[in-house]
Image (cartoon, rainbow, N blue to C red):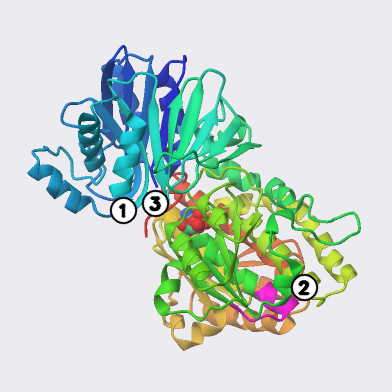
Amino acid sequence: MCGIVGYVGPKPALEVVVEGLARLEYRGYDSAGVAILSDGKLQTEKRAGKLANLRAALEQNPRSADGIGIGHTRWATHGAPTDHNAHPHVDNTNRVAVIHNGIIENFAQLRVELEERGCKFRSETDTEVVAHLLSEELKERGDKDLGAAMRSVCRRLEGAFTLVAICEDIPDLVVAARRNSPLVVGRGKGENFLASDVAAFIAHTRDAVELGQDQVVELRPDSVTITDYDGAPAPVREYYVDWDASAAEKGGYEYFMLKEIVEQPRAVADTLLGRVAVDGTLTLDEMRLAPQELRQISKIVIIACGTSYHAGLIAKYAIEHWCRIPCEVEVASEFRYRDPILDRQTLVIAISQSGESMDTLMATRYAREQQSRVLAICNVNGSTIPRESDGVLYTHAGPEVGVAATKTFLTQLVACYLVGLYLAQVRGLKFGDEINTIIGQLARMPEQVEKVLSTVEPVRELARSLADAKTVLFLGRHVGYPVAMEGALKLKELAYMHAEAFAAGELKHGPIALIEDGLPVVVVVPSREGRSVLHDKIVSNIQEIRARGARTIVIAEEGDESVRPYSDTLIEIPAVPTLLQPIVATVPLQVFACELALAKGNDVDQPRNLAKSVTVE
Ligand code: M6R
């Protein structure tokens, strides 16, 4: 949840670290801090609030910029977001500084032990125990082996953590450790970096090393040494980051979210790239699950959270329709607590943009323990969920910095369609030309999304006109229902207003009582082709709510004149096949939520109380 940066090398460490933190602020932004070790002196600065507060403090109280440095943006778990709970935390001798992402579950017991030995705690965080433990360990060892001290301390910790430490007595060394929490190293020439996410250092290097579970890295300007917690050399994966630095920046937009919405045609196209072999068959190279295994699957269970869950709900319609395999979709945080029925013939699909959502990770582990095969759909290369899964299909949306998922949602949909088609192919349920027809329809989606984007100005105006609304309801049927859910989630998280989605057919079973004069209701109308019954039913639903005073905002395919008489606002989207409609229907809802939130003066990149990747349960 928090963002972590470390640097060793000749550049001004303070600058490199603060610049890295700016790129990671999306991971947590309730406080920020740095520790710099320069000329044998350890200095720290930390502030509650956004990074701007830390920058202001550093300007007022200039620190040496050289040496080595570590930095942190926080999303509070233990202890309120205050100056003294902000990271780094130091030991009682002020010689060891530590930053941390995750939760140390046995911290309370460790704290009692440390206090009994005379340690004075200055924060309410779980992190501070590590600073004291490292300090004690170094003292006991009587040497300057911070790596060995870290390994020893990590063996005593329970929970999920990325820890980074520096020590005043040891210049040129940053030590870090990870368990169930992300950590990646960037290799430079005569300098090295570490961070929770490559975005922090891609301006300097694109050569990355991914740390595995329970590993410790010792970073010096000319070396990167990685071991397991016992000190044995550990296997690592080196890779080249194919995002450039500009992709992680705002590209002229005021907010990342605005840029990311506009990037959707490209993201969809990139996710489709290279999926069809020369012989015309669909190939999913990274999938790693053999066709034979996929033929034996008798059930699919999709696990995910938030927006990724909505992608899963849509996937169900496509997979069941194309493959005739029963498909359940479950919120990952509930999954393992209900004793789900899983076996070797169950394929679990874990959808996660970040690949780090703890709920989805835990559900993934549970599924694998039950002998099910797990396929991850993920946007972040090398993140934990795909690493722990049997196979992976990466979406190629590029970095998504805005907390609200936009381009990654559309690419998750594409990935889900690809999985559905691939299953249909390997199980012999569709002819090659049928699959190619759908691939061809998907290939036209970037153009269709572009078209939607070029016509959304009226949606912006509408959103601004509704800035004072108290509630917005969303209705949909079939794949339009999860689209409505996604529209409501976007509005809640960005505009901080009550928004709720209903299956339009459920309206008459209760929610219709909510309709009152002027209440805005957004209705996602299914395509007329293929599912004409649904289309006609939803037209009746629109009439029902309008008769009771609702202000109807109707999203329907262009040329659908049947809805016009009942629409206070009609938002037209291109006519596309029924199952693919979510790709185009979601876009106006993203724009609507974003613009309404901006009209209310909200920060759409960093909405309150939220973080981009939720690495706690
Ligand atoms: O990284 P993940 O896809 O696992 O994240 C899941 C949710 O936390 C995420 O989709 C969240 O709901 C978004 N902020 C919604 O815009």
Q: Return the residue at label 3.
A: 610
Residue 482, can we see it? yes
- Image coordinates for residue 88, horizontal then vertical, percent: 28, 33
- Image coordinates for residue 83, horizontal then vertical, percent: 22, 35
For the residues bearing labels 3 and 2, Cβ distance under 8 angstroms:
no
Check mark 3 vs ligand 1: CB closer than 8 Å? yes or no: yes
- Amino acid residing under circle 1: Glu
Magenta-drawn stretch contains 453: no
Given residues 239 and 195, the one toward you in this image is 239
Q: Which mark is residue 424?
A: 2
In the rendered structure, the answer to whether residue 200 lies left or right of residue 124 reads right
What range of the chain is rendered magenta? Answer: 317-327
Q: Where is 563 relative to 128, above or below? A: below
Q: Where is 315 relative to 9, above or below? A: below
**Disc 3: CA contacts within 10 A as few (<14), some (14-19) or many (>=20):** some
Q: Quadrant of residue 459?
A: bottom right
Q: Residue at x 77, y 73 (%)?
A: 424
**Disc 2: CA contacts within 10 A as few (<14), some (14-19) or many (>=20):** many
- Amino acid residing under circle 3: Leu
Q: Residue furthest top?
A: 39
Secondary element at image label 3: loop
Cα gap from disc 3 to disc 1, whole angstroms: 25 Å
Q: Return the residue at label 1.
A: 158
Cα gap from disc 3 to disc 2, whole angstroms: 38 Å
Magenta-drawn stretch contains 323: yes
